[in-house]
Image (spheres, rainbow, N blue to C red):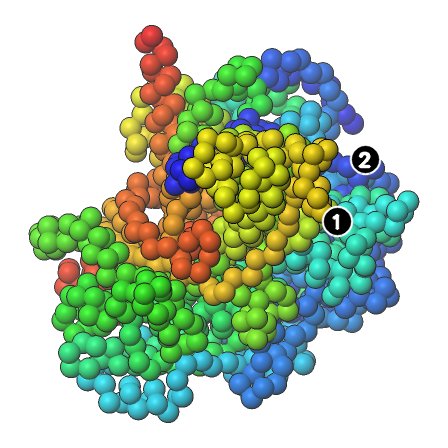
Amino acid sequence: MEIKISVNVNGKNYVREVEPRTLLVHFLRDTLRLTGTHIGCDTSSCGACTIHVDGVAVKSCTMLAVQADGSSITTIEGLAQGAELHPLQEGFKECHGLQCGFCTPGMIMTAADLLAKNPNPSEAEIRHGLEGNFCRCTGYHNIVKAVQYAAEKMGTEISA
Amino acid sequence: MSNKYIGKAVKRVEDKRFITGKGKYTDDMILPRQTYAYIIRSPYAHAQVKSIDISQALATEGVVAVFTGDDIAQSGINGVPAGWQVNFKNGDIMKEPPHPLLVGTGSTVKHVGDAVAVVIAESKEIAADAAELVEIDYEVFDAVVNPVEAVKEGAPLVHESAPNNIAFDWEIGNPKAEVDEAIANSHHVTSLEFVNQRMVPNPIEPRSAIGHYESSSDRYTLYTSTQNPHLIRLLMCAFVLGIPEHKVRVVGPDVGGGFGSKIFHYTEEALVTWCSKQIERPVKWTSERSEAFITDAHGRDHVTHAEMGFDKDGNVTALRIKTFANLGAYLSTFAPAVPTYLHGTLLQGLYTTPKIHLDMTCAFTHTNAVDAYRGAGRPEATYLLERLMDLAAHEMGVDPVELRLKNFIPPFDGVNQPGYQTQVALQYDSGNYHEVLRRGVAMLGYEEFRKAQAEAAQSNKLLGVGFSTYIEACGIAPSAVVGALGARAGLYEVGQVRVQPTGKVSVYTGAHSHGQGHETTFAQVVADKLGIPLEDVEIHHGDTETVAFGMGTYGSRSLAVGGSAIVKSLEKIIEKGAKIAAHKLEANEEDLTFADGKYTVNGTDKSVAFGDIALTAYVPHNYPAGLEPGLDFSSFYDPANFTYPYGCHIAVVEVDKETGKVSLKRFIAVDDVGNVINPMIVDGQIHGGLAQGIGQALLEGAIFDENGQLINGSYMDYCMPRADDLPMFELDRTETPCPHNPLGVKGAGEAGCIGSTPAVVNAVLDALWSGGFGHVKDILMPTTPERVWRAMNS
Amino acid sequence: MQLTGSHTLAAPIEKVWQMLMDTDILAKIVPGVSRLEKTGENEFEAISEIKLGPVSGKFSGGLTLSDIVEPSTFTLNVSQNSKIGNADASIKINLLALDAQQTEISFEGEAKLSGLLARTGQRVLSGVANTLTKQFFTNFEEEIAS
């Protein structure tokens, strides 16, 4: 039995039939072929699948696709404004906040939510805010710097 | 020639695809007509498969095929062998039972997770559902999980062919009797029994593989999350499936971290390849995380008794070690080399120890395989040496920094002074070991720290500092040397440089990048050597079809070996270009200088740009007689020696006396990885290594119960460092060039992971010692609050 | 995993014993059990659906009673299989008449877990076991009262 859902993903409307048990992350990856959202665990522990649902960071493996019916979703593919990178994307590149890149989409989406709630976080607040996302490559050092870079840049942009 | 890129923190060119969600990892691919494999795995560590009933699963709609070990055996496939042979002390060949792709009826599964059947279906959900309908009857036997228990008389046997579960025993160093005598004559002997616990590498991308057989050409393609596609192809074709190598293409696309665990040839790679042939459709398998925990090769897992002797002045006189290493149920690709040649040979450390002996027993157990994990053998050697050093200093009442400085090998550059010959086979290339420790101690502010520590000792929050100095053997490896030591492959690297007619450059390397940034670092080297913009260079890797050959990335070898191969090809390009330039400039080749992207006639302003040479090479209308057109060279570089990065790591911790909780306050690392091409990337490699080494000291460790069940096999249960477990790292470096490779580089991938673990544990103990718990000699890793609390309250 | 517990029920020991030996009642009061069928003398087949913290699954397998000493003790041997792993438990159950209307029931045993069940969330499993035990006794009390 398939259920029809309607979602807006990265500004585009999709109407699709999904199985009731399909997780949102599988819907994004397999049905819409947006493979920037990754799967790193099966216990909602790693954060590699983090996306925004109606503006809030969500681990997309904790949600069924049918629960997203009617919602507006942003994935890593939809974060940049055309050719212009989001300040976090820029920060991760400038500060070497990524190595293998597998955790990066989830890390950036989590950080975006963090900065939306707290535009000027301390180092401790950044570390606490990223606690739900594993990175095995960077030791988090440069990820923290990347978030600080973005916070500064976004602050500058707002005040300018 | 001026360097525009080498030595600069050039931002990574590969980042763009990763930060925009456009990386292409194996599981991101869906091939036309692709099917999905679900592998049914044993829930028992040791059991006989009595019967398998696949009829219900096979009858399920959407199921394409179900295969068991009997099907595999009928094709004459034995299983996956090791890639390295180590012999017993008495010369007998190691015990090497192959790892079957699927365990057949009547055979025994050897660890939880051993594969028994595979269901292939139109979707992964159907495959998983149908797998539930496969009825497997097991007779369960007792299991053994600990290497010391495994070799005892009467322990449950993993393989009938390996009596007492011994895969092999091994020794290295000076004659045992000499070492015994030196220990007996020592003024002081520091003795320690400890465990280097089992680690799960845990790259965040779970392993994935797609086998694709095409009957039209009788060709196979295997996409797999691997660190070395060519080695996988060689092993799988020649030793497992018996397929001609030229009929197989192996692609390692973007790979989400490896840390060693994706070096090895896994049974699943051969399985999907074989299955694809049977059903003539692509077959994809992607590991679930809980599956990864019981099928990925783990690391470390040593139980050791070590003794270090000192004379009355505090000079080390001897080192005697007995270690039991757990290799798991089967010998994984590099497993035999890790506790032996990558471990025993590093027991000299940075010290002038005159007598060393290691006695190693490598055991099979009913657990998944243990193989190289970031550092591979060298972290175990460093942990052993550095724990003994700090403990000896504590026991003898001397300063741990002074004790190290006293025993360090004197500085040598490997050019004017010869390399340093160790007691354990290696010859170190170059180093100034005193300097890294002095710098680290200065960064720490040692005197002030000891004052603060004395004050803290009166409070509930104890402070401790731990030191660790390490050396590692990287740039793996001279083929003749490793061949003599049992490697079944050479460990050279291949680098091809293809100058396109327009002067743009395509580079093909046998190294594989899964986070290391080769696409940037290698391009920096090429751009500077040819004097062209970085954008004009593109690095290709990870595909056996485009890259001639290669040995992959591990052992911090990519730049030292793979980079050197590229440099060799660049030299050939420049040399041939000079012939063309001489012709164009009507000058003698010997009178030309190549710099900044052009050939110039010495003493004149006559020059020709590299781009013009490239075009001429491909449009050879006016061309030197007898010279072949084209500008494309490939080179094999076989290193003359290992490279030897070294460094000093210092940890500062706070220990809560009431709860035993350890907080890492500072971490200082001064490393010497030789010349540095991209300092940003090198620092990043160090950071990541530190996090994993610190993780071992404070948080991580696989726990098996006595039945062989891994009881912390998920990210909820296995504790890895998260962002708020770590401080900002304080790094510095010295640069002592490697004398025997053209770039003077030594390798940086594993350094952080090798030095950091003992620094942290030493710091925890130092905190306890400062708080009046001087009797505590050891705390098992990870140093959890419970263990630290118990140590203080014992 | 160790399993221990005790509870006092407001019923005479004979009645408690009788209820424990009654398949229909057991199927009703054991949490998660959807079917319990007698397959032989002191042998049963059980199907249950249990959610254990992060993992949930459908279990099936055998239940046997041994060392029966009416009305004071017996040993319950459980061997349950599921896709997420298997559980083998041996639990000794003791009944003690506190007075004519009150019986203390206590149990002690060990469960061996395998597969996904063993490696995911074991640290939360003893909590789950406690919850299930509590539920069992609540159901038992309700059954006595009805």
Q: Residue at x 64, y 27 (%)?
A: A34
Q: Residue at x 38, y 78 (%)?
A: B423
The percent coordinates of residue B575 (x first, y second) are 57, 47
Considering every residue shown, the one lying at the far top of the view is A160
Camera-nearest residue between B677 and C112: B677
Whether residue B553 is situated above or below residue A65 in the rendered picture: below
**Image check: B641 left or right of B369?**
left
The residue beneath circle 2 is B32
**Image quarter hosting the C terminus of chain B:** bottom left
**Image check: B304 left or right of B352?**
right
How far is disc 1 from disc 2 in space, using C-alphas? 18 Å
- Specify the amino acid type for callout 1: Arg
| Residue B133, numbered circle | none
Mark 2 burial class by Cα count in 10 Å: few <14, some 14-19, many 20+: few
Camera-nearest residue between B695 and B490: B490
**Image quarter hosting the N terminus of chain B:** top left
Q: Residue at x 39, y 32 (%)?
A: A95
- Asked whether residue B191 is in view, the answer is no
- Specify the amino acid type for callout 2: Pro
Whether residue A25 is situated above or below residue A9 in the rendered picture: below
Whether residue B452 is situated above or below residue B347 in the rendered picture: above
User: Of label 1 and label 2, which has the lower sequence position?
Assistant: 2
- Asked whether residue B169 is in view, the answer is yes
The percent coordinates of residue C133 (x first, y second) are 52, 51
The percent coordinates of residue C74 (x first, y second) are 59, 67
| Numbered-mark total | 2
Whether residue B673 is situated above or below residue B100 in the rendered picture: above
The residue beneath circle 1 is B249
Q: Residue at x 50, y 80 (%)?
A: B170
